[in-house]
Image (spheres, grey):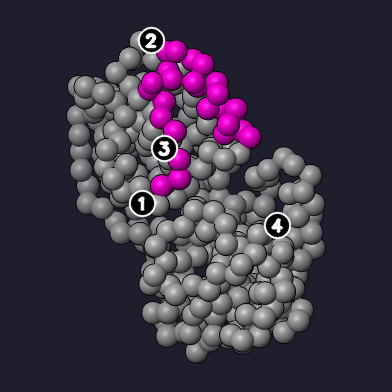
Amino acid sequence: MKNIVFLIPNKDFGGAEKMTLWYYKLFQEFGHSVSLLILADTGHGIDLENYNPTILKSRSSMSSVFSLTQSIKKLNPDIIFVSRENALVTAILQKFLFGIKIIYRPPTLLRNELSRNLKYKLLRALLTYSYEYIDLFVAQSLEIHTELKERKIPVSKLIHISNLNSRKVKTSRSTNGISQVDTVTYLIVANVSFVKGLDVLIDAFDNMIDDYPNSELLIAGRVDSNYAIDLKTIVNKNKRINEKVKFLGWQSDVDDLFEKADVVVLSSRMEGFPNALVEANEHNKPIVSTRCCESVHELVVDRMNGILVEKNNSEDLMRGLIDVRSIDYQALQYRINDDTLPYLNVVINKL
């Protein structure tokens, strides 16, 4: 059995962090010794009592290098598991110091640029040269797996484990649509950022509201970026939608929101694997999603359990928001490939 440390950059939890915790539990079930390290004492927290984390008193991932090195000396792990690019840099430094194996689960497609600032682009360039030092890549989608192979990553260092493996399959359910609901509640669970396409969604919602005034849009996610602040200002000045678009901020538990929602929306320009759509299917909610990645087609069958629209297209997204109100919804049945999980354990034990 291995001693494995899981690195999380800070207490701002999104899909990558939630999946890191899922792998923590999985490896614990396999019988490995597991520890959770949070590199910076910043951001929103969720209940981590069951994980007994060590939270380093740093302001950022990069400034945590010294305190992380001290913690790694103490824990003496065989493997570091990481799902975020900024945490990966610090993990590779530990590999150079102590010869620790690295498991990396890329949070998105490598060609996706999650930020447009220079600092992020420099980080991406640095990481490209560091891939040779990673011992195992865990690809959350076939699209990411294929892209890694195209980057000349040896097949022996690749394993594909879909995020669907962490979910329960729901039984089938049909409805006659939601056209008779008094108020149609659209929900998007995403940090308010450019890559999530909230500007396109709000534009689409604005364009439909005169004809469909019985609508509201709930946005659950962080609103601390300049992009988010600008978008909130635009909404607040728009009298048609300023009382119908609600920025809820970051939410530690979104189950109640999924239950309240009539429709779940994904307006992203790009994604690695859209976890929000998995949760929508778990709650048997109709979906409107952009074709932002190949994995979307695993989760949405057009006009069965949702509507697929083009990304970066507010007119098409508006059409989807309207059309989804009248589809004869049928829950999607997807097949979980549990065979990959024992194989992952075999691979880990060989590292």
Report the front residue among 323 and 181: 181
In whole angstroms, how far apart are the C-alphas of marks 1 and 3? 12 Å
Describe the element under mark 2 as helix, strand or loop: loop
Amino acid under disc 1? Asp
The residue that label 3 is drawn on is: 248
Q: Earlier in the sequence, mark 1 or mark 3?
A: 3
Q: Nearer the viewer, residue 22 or 90?
A: 90
Q: Is residue 73 visible?
A: yes
Q: Residues within 10 Å of mark 1 (few under 14, many from 20)?
A: few
Label pair 1/3, CB-CB below 8 angstroms:
no
Q: Position of residue 136 (x, y in %)?
A: 62, 72
What range is drawn magenta here?
226-251
* Residue 174 highlighted magenta (yes or no): no
- Asked whether disc 1 touches disc 4, contact meaning CB atoms under 8 Å apart, the reply is no
Cα–Cα span, label 2 and label 4: 47 Å
Q: Residue at x 49, y 53 (%)?
A: 44
Quarter of the view holding residue 145? bottom right
Name the residue nearer the viewer: 25 or 304.
25
Q: Is residue 143 in sight in this rendering?
A: no
Q: Identify residue type, mark 2.
A: Asp
Q: Amino acid at mark 3?
A: Leu
Residue at position x 51%, y 43% in the image: 222
In space, the residues marked 2 and 3 are separated at their CA atoms by 23 Å
Query: What kind of element bears circle 3?
Result: strand
Residue 267 pos. (x, y %): 50, 34
Mark 4 and mark 3: Cα distance apart in space: 40 Å
Mark 1 lies on residue = 253
Which dot marks residue 150? 4
